[in-house]
Image (cartoon, rainbow, N blue to C red):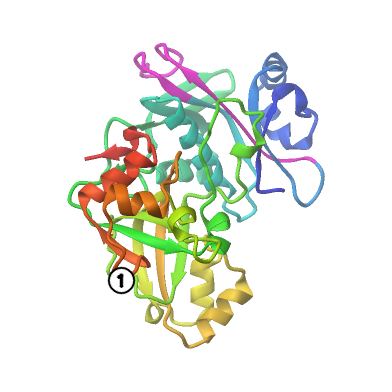
Amino acid sequence: MGQTLRPTKFKDVDLNDKFFDSLKAQYQEFSGWFLKKAAEPAYVIDDDIGKGIRGFLYIKVETGEITDVQPPLSAKRRLKVGTLKVNARGTKLGERIIKRIFDHAILEDVSEIYVTVFDTHVSLINLFKRYGFEQKGVKTTPNGQELVLLRSFETLANDIVRDYPLMQTSGKAKWLLAIKPEFHTDLLPDSILKTEDTASEADVPHTNSIHKVYIAGLSLNRMKRGDLVIIYRTTDIQGKAYYRSVATSVCVVEATYARKYFKDADAFVAFAKDHSVFGEQQLRDRYADGKPLYVAKLTYNAAFVKRPNRGALLDVVGITSQPKWDLRALSDAQFSSILELGKVDENLIVN
């Protein structure tokens, strides 16, 4: 369970856990502040090696002017990352936490996200900057000076990762890409925050990462960087595809590769292991089996609120039954229709 962002309340978190020692050392007021937040929601990552805590996240919506930073931030609806600490140990936990922050930002319909962080936390700063945060000022307190990092949803960097989870659709090719049900849940869990109630365990999938590696036997090289992909989960019951095969989510292509890109099995494993559904030995076996091997790296931008089934894709969207729906080109109109049926937040779409 050490990969799960578990929703809880401050009062149910052990402030005496050694995990918080570094925060107490950097922020003299931390313990008093923490106790005052008793009834407020937070996320905890439990340590999967020993007892205790491995990560902690507190976020809140603010609407007024931010005057305790220089230069001040004008009044806007924004999400503040109040507290974030994670002992990542080389895993993708930081990426999962960033995704959860973005999930809340979209749910709350904010204009921007901001966080203050000491410049000694280099890896954390680099993580935020990777996903479009920029330094916009400083915050000076008795504890020292922190950097103010801000991510705006009102401007684009024209970069797939730095603009995540926003998607540019104009001039981009669109695709329907099939995935078998036995792989779908692990690779592309339903990441929708259905409610603001953080006590809802169902809203917190354990494999909630931003980047996904899709491995196939069919050529994926028709897809190019920036293309948009509707993920289509095939039926789990033979002969019931009309009702049970469903479109589930939308991704953006970062890159596609063929086997020859990887110089050996080690290179293939290193590339795929953190973001695919397969374990290391499965990846080695797949590399060694001699069958056609293609890989797509995708960003996982949005899970559908409603999942249109094959019947709706045929009868409403107008996709023909042939050619086969393994990797199928979509028109702009078909793509837009699927997003509308899926009730994807229109704020994610940039035309």
Q: Is residue 265 left or right of residue 300?
A: right
Q: Secondary structure at mark 1?
A: loop
Q: Position of residue 286 (x, y in %)?
A: 53, 79
The residue positioned 82% from the left and 44% from the top of the image is 51
Is 22 rendered above or below residue 167? Answer: above
Using the image as rendered, state which of residue 155 and residue 308 is in the foreground: 308
Left or right, 160 with respect to 7, comes to: left
Please identify the quarter of the rendering in which residue 55 is found.
top right
Q: Is residue 68 left or right of residue 42?
A: left
Q: Is residue 69 magenta?
A: yes
Q: Is residue 274 visible to the viewer in this orientation of the structure?
A: no
Instruction: Please name the amino acid that badge 1 sits on.
Output: Asn
Task: Single out the residue that lies furthest toward the left.
Answer: 171
Residue name at image x 36 percent, y 41 percent: 341
Residue receiving disc 1: 221
User: Which residue is depicted at the point 33% across and 32% down?
Assistant: 347
Q: Is residue 213 above or below residue 25?
A: below
Numbered range of the magenta stretch: 52-79
Looking at the rendered image, the quarter that the C terminus falls into is top left
Q: Is residue 258 above or below residue 44?
A: below
- Tell me how many marks there are: 1
Q: Quadrant of residue 323?
A: bottom left
Pick the residue in front: 193 or 124. 193
